[in-house]
Image (cartoon, rainbow, N blue to C red):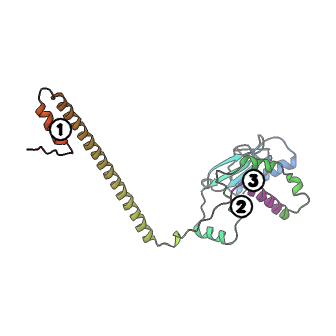
Amino acid sequence: MCGDFNFPEIKWPEGTLSAGGTLDHQAQAKALLEVTDKSLLTQQIITPTRRDNILDLYFTNNQESINKYRTEKNILSDHNLIVINTAYKKNKSERAERNTTGSSPFTELNFFSEKIEWEKLQQSFSEVDWEQTILNEDPNTMLHTLLDKLLQICRLHIPIRRRRKDNRSNIPRHRKILMLYKKLVKAHTEERKRRINAKITEIEQQLKQSHTDQRAQEEGKAINKIKCNPKFFYSYCKRYSKIKLRLAH
């Protein structure tokens, strides 16, 4: 059970009455505490929801059903917005039923996109005279008018969500496992091949550098022996010469 109960006389989380307010208001607050006490309901909101008062309440008979909650300021009301994360999860059949019975037009918008124009969105909300928009309308029409106006503004500043056709649900479980296994084997094989190729390239570079160093060392040795040992220099030149010379007899 939750809502704006508007009982500043009740101190939370103690759940006790304090002085203040009219006798009628005090009686209503006392009745609320008696009903929730008999029903074994505990109130979970312990941070202010309007100025310094806790007016918006959330009662439950299962405290473990709530993971956490937070309060946020908003431009549509002087009350803070309460966001509650519960431990309840809908099963697939419930989600499928919800999708087939008609979904909200807001689901077409991508509220997780990085391209959302938050500042322009907030400015557009603040420029609307909300009281005048729903003036003299019955509650049902009022709700539809608000939703239509909100949707109209959101569509201006929030990207449309792209829909992707997912055929994976039609794939048998054993096929999914096999596909995953093949992907892992392929990834392992490609990684192993990449490591081997990298090692081969490294060895080839080392051999090439070793050969270059050896040639430079031998060439330097041959040059140094031009005067003292011409035969050694001639043998070196003959070994690496690309042109074979023929001597006339």
Residue 28: x, y in percent? 82, 52
Q: Is residue 236 magenta?
A: no
Q: Are marks 3 and 2 in contact (CB under 8 Å)?
A: no
Residue 47: x, y in percent? 70, 43
Assign a secondary structure to mark 1. Answer: helix
Question: In the image, is residue 3 above or below residue 170?
Answer: above
Give the spatial CA distance, label 1 vs label 2: 85 Å
First to last magenta residue range: 143-164
Question: From where the camera sits, is residue 76 visible?
Answer: no
Residue reaching furthest to the front: 249
Q: Nearer the viewer, residue 207 or 54?
A: 207
Residue drawn at x 14%, y 45% as measured from the top left: 246
Residue drawn at x 59%, y 61% as measured from the top left: 89
- The label on residue 106 is 2
Q: Main secondary structure of the magenta part?
A: helix
The answer to whether residue 44 is left or right of residue 153 is: left
Q: Nearer the viewer, residue 116 or 43?
A: 116
Give the spatial CA distance, label 3 vs label 1: 112 Å
Q: Nearer the observer, disc 3 or disc 1?
A: 1
Assign a secondary structure to mark 2. Answer: helix
Going from N to C along the chain, the mark reached first, 1 or 2, is 2
The answer to whether residue 15 is left or right of residue 112 is: right
